[in-house]
Amino acid sequence: MRKLRRDHAAMTAFAALVLIILVCVAAPLYANGVAHTDPFASNLSGSITINGQDVPIMAAETEGLGLGTTPLGPTWTGQYFLGADSQGRDVMARLLYGGQNSLIIAGSATVLTLVLAAIVGIVAGFFGGWTDVVLSRLLDVLWAFPVYLLAISLSIVTIGHGLSIGPVSIASDSLLLPIAIIGIIYVPYVARPIRGQVLQLKQSEFVLAATGLGVPPWRILWVDILPNVMSTLIVFAPLTIALNMIIESALSFLSIGVQSPAASWGTIIEDGQGLLYTRPLVAIAPGVAIVLTVLALNVFGDGVRDALDPRAKLRVRD
């Protein structure tokens, strides 16, 4: 019964993830076909029609000295469903486009993390010796820095002029920059378990037999080692996506992640920081989106672990 509940929770979480992805992918359809607005352009003097009346996007304040403006609140209709931000932009449209960027960055950074971690962990564990020593020390250097401190430091260094490594150049406003930074910082946390698993596989009978028969090392790595560590990499994937999404949101909130006029859930929270008392939904909506997505990823990740890890299955039965 407990296993059925966990399986049902995992499937529900997977369905929620698919729904979130589909809704974010539909951002252009909402912006162009429903809201008829450009979510990346300021609209300080515009107006919309609600119940036959023209309503300004940015209304003049009537309290106190009457200085400043207040963005339009939620209309709960097609246009400005969640209201406007301080620049007069449709919050709902930006929320959907921001979700696209947050999911793209978190997913791509996860792929980069898993690929680099698999390469480093497999090579260090299989070849050993000085190869293992050098790679392990490099992992220790990355491990020594707190994750957020390392991410913030790298972002601050590269945000001004971008990143140039030989012929490869990444502009400061490119999504590739946060993908590269976030993808690198979590490599030690995945590479070390992979290295330990490879050290165990290296002593297994089928690997020793292949070595004794003179099978080339590259073939052993490709045929015997890699397929056996794939399940571990798959288990790491949902959790790593969740962690990457949180750190991307933190960097964007600090204005050292996704750069304006592009949006992510972190940048929208930062946009709504000054509107917490007048238009709190500007900051609350992306925060709720992050919480729901991370929660779904964690629940789904637990289900994937139970399906691929025999020891987890035994724990569930107990």
Image (cartoon, grey):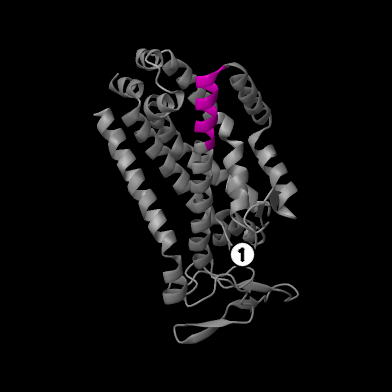
Q: Which amino acid type corresponds to the residue marked 1 in the rendered image?
A: Thr
Residue at 67 percent of width and 54 percent of height: 169
Is residue 124 covered in magenta? Answer: yes
Judge from the rendering whether residue 144 lies leftward or rightward of residue 89; answer left or right.
right
Q: Position of residue 298 (x, y in %)?
A: 43, 38
Q: Quadrant of the C terminus?
A: top left
Residue 25: % across, % down: 42, 61
Q: Is residue 32 magenta?
A: no
Q: Which residue is mark 1?
A: 278
In the rendered view, does 172 fall on the left or right side of 289? right
Q: Which segment is the magenta one?
A: 116-128
The furthest residue to the front: 214
Rendered image quadrant of residue 143: top right
Q: Nearer the viewer, residue 69 or 290?
A: 290
The image quarter in which residue 311 lies: top left
Majority secondary structure in the magenta region: helix
| Location of residue 5 (image quadrant) | top left
Question: Which quadrant, please, contains the N terminus?
Answer: top left
Residue 178 in the figure: left or right of residue 51: right
Residue under the point 48% across and 17% down: 199
> In the rendered image of this protein, does residue 116 appear above or below residue 171?
above
Specify few, some or many for label 1: CA neighbours under 10 Å numbering under 14, 14-19, or 20 or more: few
Residue 66 versus residue 297: which sits nearer the camera? Answer: 297
Q: How many marks?
A: 1
Where residue 56 appears, as percent x and y from the top left, is 58, 81
Drawn side of residue 201 relative to residue 41, left or right: left
**Residue 137 appears in the rendering:** yes
Q: Secondary structure at mark 1?
A: loop
